Image: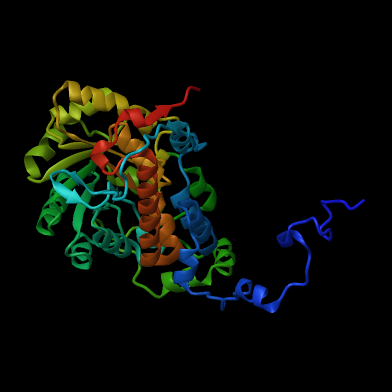
Amino acid sequence: MTNSTDPGSKDVPAALRRRFPKYADLAPLMQFKKPDFSKSARLRSASTIWDLRDMAKRRTPQAPFDYTDGAAEAEITLRRAREAFLDIEFRPGILRDVSTIDLSTSILGKASKLPVGIAPTGFTRMMQSEGEYAGSQAAQAAGIPYTLSTMGTASIEDVAEAAPNGRNWFQLYLWTDRDRSLELIERAALAGNDTLMVTVDTAVAGARLRDVRNGMTIPPALTLKTVLDASYRPAWWFNFLTHEPLVFASLSRFTGTAADLINSMFDPTLTFDDLAWLRETWKGKLVVKGIQTVEDARKVVDHGADGVVLSNHGGRQLDRAPIPFHLLPEVNAALKADNSDAAIMLDTGIMSGADIIAALALGADFTLIGRAYLYGLMAGGRAGVDRALEILETDMRRTMALLGVSKISELTPDHVRLLPK
């Protein structure tokens, strides 16, 4: 008796009978491409920010990579911040027209093509030689704000010249020397910065143990360890040694650790009276970064802030600090109860466009990225930052469409559920 499941049986459909493959059948399958080892091809292969992080780690010496990647003490805060975005459930709507997705929004009175901007990051040219120039130009091209740090490695004027059509903001650490702080504020205004972002969570430096263990200094020192490390990343050291030494946005050249700089320059006596002085001094938009409680959000708005950034400094200051994403609904409710129109921004832990959409749904007006864009910078300079923003935009568009919303204003807390612990 013939087994009807036997491929050689006449009872088996023709498509399932074995035969010797013909060249005409194989030809369409044999599409061998010429290997492409270019930077653009390498960056195109990155589908996530985590992919860019892997590239960055391979291309950057350990000390500057860990300065970016690390956080304070046991790095509990950073881990919890990222986990917070994972511990949610999206709740999509169906049968909505999502043929067109509009990611544009308004922040502090001006339009932004995406609901995300670049956060202030210190020593950026140490991560990759293009530094702030790459970040500001990529932000300009994407139509989003760029924030230069007081501890940035390009001057306020140079960033304005590099991205003359961009929306440039300046982040301020108040110094014990108020005259020098005032000078910075005046320079920022003259350079066309429309927003001043004052950071208030750095009374003293956090215990960034990776930096301590790496012997991290500003600028990086050529020790035996770094020379050995350089042998695996020659391109980074070639770029670093053949470009101008690190020049800071707001202070003269400095040699030492980041903690030494913070503890010697920044003012641990800062109070709400200083915020009131800033409000009187600065005529543009004033944002306070480093808000970690509902009470402080209310207080800074009462003292004239146009916006707050819910942030724990990327987990780089106080370990086991409040998580901005968890704090967001409470701050949103409190400011609404006060009839405040202050902008609520959020940073820390964002590694995907879905993270951004979740934050917007729970009440954020805007988000900021630090590490996410720095991984792109270290992976490929300006092109790497562009790729990081492309990845986030693609993520956001896909997440919006799958949620059944076509524009930012349609997002509500009903689209996100915080999973119980």
Residue displayed at 48% across by 46% down: 70
Front-most of 110 and 251? 110
Q: Where is residue 207 shown, x and y percent of the image?
A: 45, 39
Residue displayed at 82% across by 51% down: 5
The image shows a total of numbered marks equal to 0
Residue 162 visible, this angle: yes
Residue displayed at 59% across by 74% down: 31
Q: Where is residue 33 shown, x and y percent of the image?
A: 57, 76
In the image as oriented, which residue stretches furthest toward the right?
A: 1
Q: Is residue 146 left or right of residue 54?
A: left
227 shown above or below 292: below
Residue displayed at 84% across by 55% down: 6
Front-most of 269 and 333? 333
Q: Where is residue 15 shown, x and y percent of the image?
A: 71, 61
Colouring mode (rainbow / by chain / secondary structure / one colour): rainbow
Residue 133, image quadrant: bottom left
Q: Where is residue 210 shown, x and y percent of the image?
A: 51, 47
Residue 127 visible, this angle: no
Front-most of 51 and 319? 51
75 shown above or below 110: above
Q: Is residue 4 left or right of residue 268?
A: right
